[in-house]
């Protein structure tokens, strides 16, 4: 006869898959309920049902870059991990809600849209200016400095998913330039190369902070252009990769800061929009 401990261990395994794929949670609820019936443990059954029906919330301790940034941002009198309108806010400072997001802006787009109706919200996004990559090779840890130097403009890699968010009067964005350590593990090994995945990131120090209170503040990232320009010309003038330059132009256009004025050699021309 299977024991409750056996099914508890099986539940933990299934839950790991459910975290990676939220659509798996419904299937896990069915299987968990079935297993509890086999065990004949009504208390365990009610626990599973409450857990997956959303009536019970189990919070895991935070760690890594997100938790360390929260500690760095916290000031005396702040409420950490408070609840507002059913949403969990990282830091509550009076009528200001501070939300730290290390990536994946689409994940919090709906949350911010609702909170902005009644609160001032500041989204904090860290950009690693320098990264130290730690990998374990042949049982030994190797630490090296990544040649990539991060820039403030990299925020457009995320902002492209919600480019009109800065138009909200209660919204502000704070970009933190940081030094960070990044632990990587082998994802798979091929004949010619090995793929790695990031397992953990930690804060070394915060180098600089840039706050964007209004849409016009984003124009400070735009280099001085003589008249109309293309994304390729912007890429060369700012020293950005063409993909990032295109995302920057797209976001600035959505904010109403620049506008398309024509084409040259099949490339779109933009210039600053008259205020």
Image: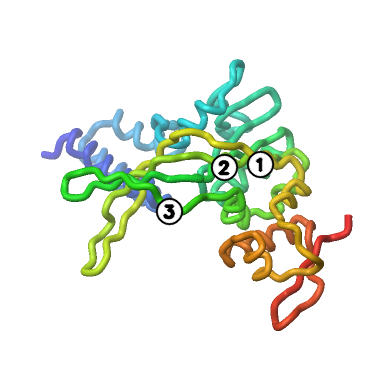
Is 229 in front, or is 5?
Answer: 229
For residue 147, which numbered disc appears in the image?
3
Q: Name the residue under label 2.
A: 125
Indicate whether 48 appears above or below 74.
Answer: below
Residue 263: horizontal and vertical position, in percent? 76, 78
- From the top left corner, tell me how far across and down residue 83 is, in percent: 58, 28
Residue with the most extreme bottom position: 265
Comes first in the chain, label 1 or label 2: 2
Answer with mark 3 or mark 1, whichever residue precedes in sequence.
Answer: 3
Query: Residue placed at 57% from the left, 50% from the top?
Result: 151
Depth order, front residue of 21/170: 170
Q: Could you tell me if residue 30 is visible in this image?
A: no
Q: What element carries label 3?
A: loop
Query: Looking at the figure, which quarter contains the N terminus?
Result: top left
Quadrant for the C terminus in the image: bottom right
Image position of 36 (left or right of 270): left
- Between the residue at mark 3 and the residue at mark 1, the CA separation in whole angstroms equals 27 Å
Badge 2 density bin: few <14, some 14–19, many ≥20, Cα 10 Å:
many
Q: Which of marks 3 and 1 is in front?
A: 3
């Amino acid at each position: 006869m299977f024991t409750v401990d056996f099914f508890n261990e099986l539940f933990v395994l299934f839950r790991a898959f459910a975290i990676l794929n939220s659509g798996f949670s419904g299937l896990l609820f069915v299987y968990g309920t079935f297993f509890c019936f086999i065990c004949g443990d009504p208390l365990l059954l009610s626990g599973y049902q409450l857990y997956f029906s959303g009536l019970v919330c189990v919070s895991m301790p935070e760690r890594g870059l997100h938790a360390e940034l929260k500690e760095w941002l916290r000031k005396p009198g702040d409420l950490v991990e408070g609840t507002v309108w059913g949403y969990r806010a990282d830091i509550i400072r009076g009528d200001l809600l501070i939300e730290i997001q290390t990536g994946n802006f689409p994940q919090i787009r709906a949350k911010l849209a609702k909170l902005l109706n009644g609160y001032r919200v500041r989204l904090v996004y860290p950009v690693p200016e320098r990264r130290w990559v730690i990998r374990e090779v042949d049982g030994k840890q190797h630490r090296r400095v990544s040649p990539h130097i991060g820039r403030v403009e990299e925020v457009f890699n995320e902002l492209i998913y919600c480019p009109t968010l800065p138009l909200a009067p209660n919204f502000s964005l704070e970009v933190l330039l940081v030094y960070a350590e990044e632990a990587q593990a082998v994802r798979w090994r091929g004949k010619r190369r090995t793929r790695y995945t990031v397992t953990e990131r930690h804060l070394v120090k915060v180098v600089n902070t840039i706050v964007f209170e209004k849409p016009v503040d984003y124009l400070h990232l735009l280099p001085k252009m003589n008249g109309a320009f293309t994304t390729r010309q912007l890429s060369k003038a700012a020293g950005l990769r063409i993909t990032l330059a295109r995302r920057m132009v797209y976001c600035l256009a959505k904010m109403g800061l620049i506008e398309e004025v024509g084409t040259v050699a099949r490339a779109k021309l933009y210039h600053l929009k008259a205020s």
